[in-house]
Amino acid sequence: MLENTKCECGHQNPPDTALCESCGKPLGTEALTDGPLEMRYDGVARRSQKSNPNLLDRIWSFFSSVKVAVVLIVITLIAAIFGTILPQENAFINFDPSWYEEHYGLAGKIYYMLGFSRTYESWWFITLLVMIGASLVICSLDRVVPLYRALNKQQVRKHIQFLTRQRVTYAADLEDDDAEWMRKLAEQFRKRRFRVRVEDNALLAEKNRFSRWGPYINHVGLIIFLLAVLARAIPGWQLDEYVGVREGEIAHIPETNYYVKNLDFEVEFYSDDELPERLKGTLRPKRFVTKAELYVCEANCGSTALEPVLRKVKEHDIVVNDPLEYKGLKLYQFDYDTTPRLKTIRPVLVDLKSGETYGPFELSILEPEPEYELGPYRLKLITRFLDFTVNADGVPGNKSSQPNAPAFLFLIEGPDLPEGGETFFYFPIPTDRERFGQDLINGELAERFDFRVTDMAHVEFLGDVSYLNVRVDRALPYIFAGAFISLIGLVMGFYWQHRRVWLRIDDGRLTLGAHTNKNWYGLRSEVAAALRSAGLEADPKSLDNGGKRR
């Protein structure tokens, strides 16, 4: 059954309208109450306040609730706090899941298992952001459309009940000509920068209407901000990675079509004279710089069989806080490693029983040959470790991808050896040989053979490693734009108030009602001043009609 919402003035209002959109007469439950009117959105019907909502209306009502939005924001803030308790995974150059347990024990292990180590990239955190965004959009649409309709259809002459049930009211009998009083009152409100409309012995004075859009402009800015944050999940929009590049080498920048070459790395340390007493005798970097070249891949990109075709696009000396920048890509100087690491050595194979030596042969730490011929003996490479370690279950493995403790497992074939040869572990660094027990691992074969470096001039070391922080953030301009728009909305809403004054004169009787969205004391004072200037006695306190409703 259709609800009859036609007002006595003849205007047909939508269902659930509290005040007639034309004359302002109270309708429905609002007509049954006393005291100041509910003036929020001028009583226009909102979808979230339907009397008989369906499922879609209930969902709409849920997300349009300011309380729900506040709860979502609080939950998101608490979740964000959890993400700051321990370092996030993306803060590490080489991430090891066991790091949390090693440094923080059981609490660190639980923190990692619950996914807090990737808080800001987790599905549940992104879901919270999406829900906040949905709440902002629905809150805005649920309110801005009725508000626009209410303000756009404002009538000058309002129902007498509309005027007498405002929070600021005034009534008086006039002795002179009604038109003259209307002229004087209109003049006084214009002097106070009100926009005045006069129709049929009624007046509407209004100013600062734009301030009503402040909260919604704020919402628009926040929506742009959230969309920009979520856009970081789009491939190519956001990147925060680390890449290590040795001197003289080229490295691929992850998730991009770019390569970076480390032409040279330099580090300058503070002298003892420049350091405080407690730091004297320690190495403290004063300045470190990577002379870098940036290349873009034009062909064979991502191919493991073919060399990529590269074109140099920029050259720059990367210093801390002075990155290499190119089309939104930024390479920051993050860290360095000057630890000496072997590149190539030239050992000889020594027969300990006969004293004979065979070789030398060039052994590359990073790219060793699969076989080596040494006189009557043949070495076959079984496996290689860059950073040798023994796991908890006793199985050899790599501790990292850096050549900190290289180790080679060879199969030695030749005279006086069993058919199929025997295995031999070789640690090029003497301290590693003692630390891991090379002779103990090789057993009886250690009494027969050994590898020795007879000429240190043939030992080459790898260049210094420069660690660069790679950043791409195409969403950042939109984040700043959203924040700026939001700030504009906040300023509009905080520093201006929408003030409206309605009055009508009926046979020498003046009736006035006024409304503002905030600062009622200022409105009462302004209306009282206008009335006094027009020749009517009015005290600001006497205009207060009481009540807490807006």
Image (cartoon, rainbow, N blue to C red):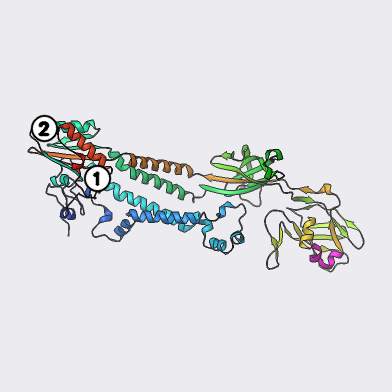
Most prominent secondary structure in the magenta stretch?
Answer: helix
| Amino acid residing under circle 1 | Arg
Indicate left or right for 408 with 414 as reference: left
Q: Position of residue 80 (x, y in %)?
A: 47, 54
Q: Residue at x 30, y 51 (%)?
A: 142
Q: Which of 94 and 311 is in front in this view?
A: 94
Magenta residues, start to end: 437-447
Indicate left or right for 1 with 207 as reference: left
Q: Mark 1 or mark 2, which is nearer the start of the sequence?
A: 1
Q: Residues within 10 Å of mark 1 (few under 14, many from 20)?
A: some
| Amino acid residing under circle 2 | Ala
Residue wearing tag 2:
179
Q: Is residue 243 visible?
A: yes
Residue wearing tag 1:
149
Q: Is residue 23 visible?
A: no
Give above or below for 244 relative to 71: above
Quadrant position of residue 319: top right
Q: Where is residue 171 in the image (x, y as percent from the top left)?
A: 13, 41
- Residue 444 part of the magenta-drawn span: yes
**Foreground label between 2 and 1:** 2
Residue farthest to the right, as pictured: 354
